[in-house]
Amino acid sequence: MIEALLKGLLTGDIKSLSRSISIVENEATGYEELLTQLPNASHTKVVGITGPPGAGKSTLVNALINALLQQGKKVAIIAVDPSSPFNFGALLGDRIRMAQHFNSPHVYIRSLASRGALGGLSTKIIEVTDVVKAAGFDYLFIETVGVGQSEVDIAGIADTSIVVVVPEAGDEIQTMKAGLMEIANIFVVNKSDRPTADQFVKNLRLLAHTKMRDGWETPVIKTVATQEKGIDELIAAITKHQQQNEQQQRKAYLLAEKLYQLIQHRRMKNVSKAALLADVMKHLAAGDVNVYKLAQTYA
Ligand SMILES: Nc1nc2c(ncn2[C@@H]2O[C@H](COP(=O)(O)OP(=O)(O)OP(=O)(O)O)[C@@H](O)[C@H]2O)c(=O)[nH]1
Ligand SMILES: [Mg+2]
């Protein structure tokens, strides 16, 4: 069964892809077999898109899809925990719908729910990402809302991480979450139709310049996603980053990071928060709770 599925997956068959993802998501029969037989090379560019709620990430992804489809590319999108019902069907531009691209094998859209389990989400994203990579897409965009740990996890999975922000008062840029600065390979200032955009972009560029690292100065791209403005510049920036990114060192780092998370997931598999809570309550009731001792019983 898995063999046939893999065959379909490798030819880019959408049904096989959907079924493969479901198997991985549910850890159904054949799950390990499927993952261990995935090819170890892929040309898919994995691009993480993160940023605060409502920054325009989905609109931006939609504009990117339109532009890339016109270049004849195949594009996949994974939306992690979409805060609003994911509705790319409605978002997709008229040009695309007229060309009947929406149901074409050139676009694949899937949302992925976080399970709240310890380390569970990022492991699932890693696995699903690898499944999608086997299906031969040119690009895979992973959209996550940047509140908390998830954007950092995505940085370990994506070849290029885009942080989407919107223009605010100039001062606030100094207080931008340090983590975002660290993970961004490309900044997008979306909603640049706002009057404060130019000053904001200027300040962000200054900040990016002072934080230049490994010969890469994080570019700051202005976009108006709703009008598909700045999209070509963004695609050019992604391409440029991926070219300088070909270094083995970063690849090894990313793979080690992946491996770490997979091992973590595997080791934590039989540990549930509910069981831990029950255990703690038992010891609390007995008046002998010591978390360090308890931890030893799980080692
Ligand atoms: N003025 C303006 N509005 C925009 C722009 N891009 C997106 N919007 C609007 O901003 C709102 C949020 O856009 P989304 O694309 O859903 O934002 P998101 O970041 O995906 O939101 P979540 O997934 O809920 O975090 C929508 O009403 C968009 O039409 C832009 O460039 N300019
Ligand atoms: Mg969204």
Image (tube, rainbow, N blue to C red):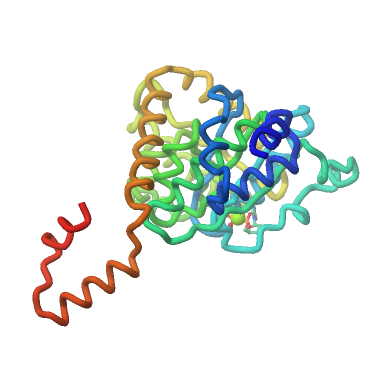
Whether residue 191 is visible to the viewer of this picture, yes or no, is: no
Q: Quadrant of residue 182?
A: top left
- Name the residue rendered at 37%, 38% in the picture: 207
* Number of numbered discs visible in the structure rendering: 0
The image position of residue 56, as x and y in percent, is 60, 52
Query: How far across and how far down the image is residue 41, in percent?
Result: 56, 22
Relative side of 134 to 256, left or right: right
Q: Is residue 257 left or right of residue 161?
A: left
**Left/right of residue 285 with respect to residue 110 in the rendered view:** left
x and y, in percent, of residue 95 in the image: 85, 43
Depth check: give the residue in front, 287 or 88. 287
Image quarter hosting the N terminus: top right
Residue 71 visible in the picture: yes
* Frontmost residue, 109 versus 226: 109
In this rendering, the answer to whether 282 lies above or below 39 is below
Name which quarter of the figure residue 103 lies in. top right
Along the line of sight, the residue nearer the viewer: 73 or 182: 73
State the residue lying farthest toward the right.
Answer: 98
Residue found at x 64% / y 43%: 20
Residue located at (49% from left, 43% from top): 163
- At 60% from the left and 32% from the top, the residue drawn is 133
Q: Quadrant of ligand 1?
A: bottom right
Residue 91 position (above or below residue 140): below
